[in-house]
Image (cartoon, helix red, strand yellow):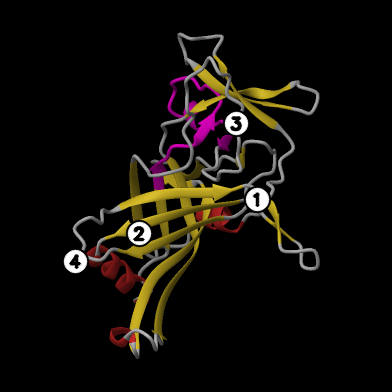
Amino acid sequence: MSLLLERDTKLKKSEYENLYEWALQEFDENGQEIGSPQIPTDLNLWFTSTEIIYKKKIFKDDYPFVESQRNYCDESELIFINLKPGVVKEDDKESYIFDDRSYSFFGTDRKIDKFNMYIKKLDNDNDNDEEGAISLGIPSYESGGDFDKKIEEDYFQINLFLNKDRFDSLVKSIERKAVNHIEFSATFPGFYSDWEPSTFYGMYSEPIKILSNDAEQVIDIPEELDIEPPKLGESFEFHLEVISPTIRNPVFEKLRDEED
């Protein structure tokens, strides 16, 4: 598999060490810098659901050579959610769209259009399972063989793990049609942006670059710098809000329906 990237990405020491020690920088084919240095961001980034689907699978696998597994039947459940960046906020005067910034992977300027979340139920009998969220993603690549080649688009996914009680409660709300949409925010490793001033709204203005956790996304790191730049992975924290159906909000409908 070969990722479809148009730029090189290198780690470099900062010229402004009082602000940040290092950054990731993109370069074109002629070795010229593209855009500003990108540093890890620890901001909560917001997403809103555009589609929510509950899936329950019942399956039977036949293992004729394993006596205990013969005619074994099992089931699995998950909640699939399509997401868009941004969330609707309200103040005393109006509703407005907040944090609908653009996202792209390092190595490309393609805007990511595909954001998905899978909510999965933990096994309460397993004490080692913990609730939490994990991010993963991969830039576009070519799949298939010589006769069935296909371009897979840039893709970002969140896996959210909830205990049985919380998962079942959410499913009941979905089945009762008591969920208008879901708002999700998290702080993940692997998200980068330009250095931003410490004003609240200014902190949510810059585009986001993503460093994939796929092994094919390679960063050029000078030997003298003993630094491993953060990649997509487990969240430091997350927030999920379930919004019930309310009076029609044209601002939310704009966020949900507008083309990226």
Residue range (magenta): 185-210
Q: Mark 1 points at which residue?
A: 260
Q: Circle 2 is placed at which residue position?
A: 242
Q: Earlier in the sequence, mark 4 or mark 3?
A: 4
Q: Mark 3 points at which residue?
A: 219
Q: In this view, does 142 lie to the left or right of 70?
A: right
**Labels 4 and 2: the sequence-earlier one:** 4
From the viewer's perspective, tell me whether residue 96 is left or right of residue 75. right
Point out the tag, 4 or 1, that comes first from the N-terminus: 4
Reading the chain from its start, which is encountered first: label 2 or label 1?
A: 2
The answer for how far apart the CA atoms under marks 1 and 3 are is 28 Å
The picture quadrant where one finds residue 54 is bottom left
Which type of secondary structure does the marked residue at label 3 adopt? loop
Q: Whole-percent x and y of residue 254?
A: 58, 54
Q: How far apart are the two marked residues, 3 and 2, measured between alpha carbons?
A: 38 Å
The kind of secondary structure element at disc 1 is: loop
Type of amino acid at the residue the image marks with label 2:
Val
Q: In this view, does 213 lie above or below 22?
A: below
Separation of residues labelled 4 and 2 (CA atoms): 27 Å
Circle 4 is placed at which residue position?
Answer: 125
Do the residues bearing badges 3 and 2 touch, measured as CB atoms within 8 Å? no
- Comparing labels 4 and 2, the label whose residue is closer to the camera: 4
